[in-house]
Amino acid sequence: MTSSAAPYLPGRHLLQVPGPTNVPQPVLEAIARPTLDHRGPGFAALALSVIEGMKRVFRTTGPVVIFPGSGTGAWEACLVNTLSPGDKVLNPETGQFSVLWGQLATQLGLEVESLPSDWRHAIDIEALRTRLGADDKHEIQALLITHNETSVGTLSDVAAIRGVLDDLGHPALLFVDAVSSLGSIDYRHDEWGVDVTVAGSQKGLMLPPGMSFNAISQKALDRQSSAKLPRAYWEWKPYLELNKNGFFPYTPSANLMAGLEVAIGLLEAEGFENIFARHIRHGEATRAAVHAWGLETQCADEAAYSPVVTAVRMPDGYAEAEFRKVVLDSYGMALGSGLGQVAGKVFRIGHLGDFDDLTLVAALAGVELSLGRADVPHKDGGVAAALAVLAAAR
Ligand code: PLP
């Protein structure tokens, strides 16, 4: 067998980037089943089951569109189906992914206003209230909210943001990127009055990359007829028509859909409350380790800690890329890099998806051993501190 992959290392490769995440064996087996004819009845039954399942995951009764594409495509789909050139959107900055979504909106011809931040806190609800309150002409057509900011490990409060819009009677559409929260962190599309939720296959849904989603409110659906941004591949309309019978306007990711059906079954068998609690526990244990090492998390607000990813600040003068290379070469574990303005300054430990206590302990042990190997100044005892959190939680 030939492969361009790195030389074989014995033992299990730990994929501890915050997405793509480890894919469970039953999901891999489903993906490996023979590809179905996407215009045949077997596929239609699968698609209808997956679409209904995804509505339960998003907690919506509205439509969910499933694209063959990445999360970035689903960002674009959300915007082009609802907005027109020159429309103003407000983009509270939380980290690199919020910035990238704003850049994409600018490239599409929208007028993007950012709400700056230090990349160490969640969205500032009072700053948002002040800005929206000053918009008495309701020029802001939409908010672009990143729920879990994967680049820095902060979680913003979508329900509170909905509350601000409601308090002010502001009609802006509420768009939420749940790419790294859906399936791992409590998320409620309908209850929080979200107009479009954007998600991807490769994080909490425990699938390989390659599929992305829009969950859509009635208000967002109604905007399709007035929205003038050019759209073709990402147009919702043909999906909404054909999906009624389990079909798609072009070739869907049939094998990933087979995997998704199994993944939804796994999520529901574990139970969403249990899954959310597991991620919170793993976040707490990881932060206990980081603090015991004497290192700092990039998130500086306890109330905004992400349950799915912890970004760790490197001590001054130490490069994260070199440290991650030591981790990969020595222990076969992939950690996330620093992105955007924190490139070189943080490494990220993903603790989401198909993940358990012992895998977390192994991942943290790999970090602790590598801090020693790479001569990064730190204290011992991080793994022990994490174990104490896990033991107490049980
Ligand atoms: N939004 C968030 C919060 C992400 O974490 C990512 C990717 O990691 C994206 C959007 C972009 O998704 P993709 O890389 O699948 O296009």
Image (tube, rainbow, N blue to C red):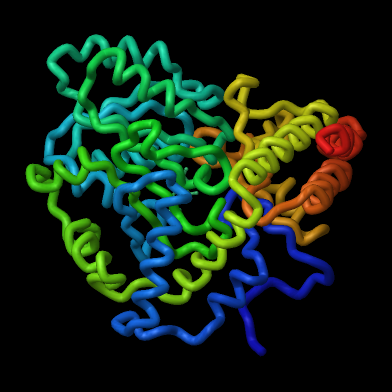
Residue at 19 percent of width and 48 percent of height: 81
> Is residue 73 positioned above or below 309 on the image?
below
Q: Is residue 50 left or right of residue 392?
A: left
* x, y percent for residue 13: 74, 64
Residue occupying the point 14% across, 42% down: 223
Quadrant hosting residue 292 = top right
Of residues 229 and 59, which is closer to you in this image? Answer: 59
| Closer to us: 240 or 139 | 240
Q: Residue at x 31, y 42 (%)?
A: 196
Count of numbered labels shown in the rendering:
0
Q: Quadrant of the N terminus?
A: bottom right
Vertical relation: 221 (above or below) 378: below
Instruction: Judge by depth and name the residue closer to the eye, 312 or 55.
Output: 55
The part of the image, by quadrant, that contains residue 41 is bottom left
Residue 70 percent location from the top left of the image: 40, 58
Q: Nearer the viewer, residue 31 or 79?
A: 31
Measuring from the top left, give residue 164's x and y in whole percent. 34, 17
Residue at figure coordinates x 68%, y 50% from the top left: 335
Residue 108 seen in render: no
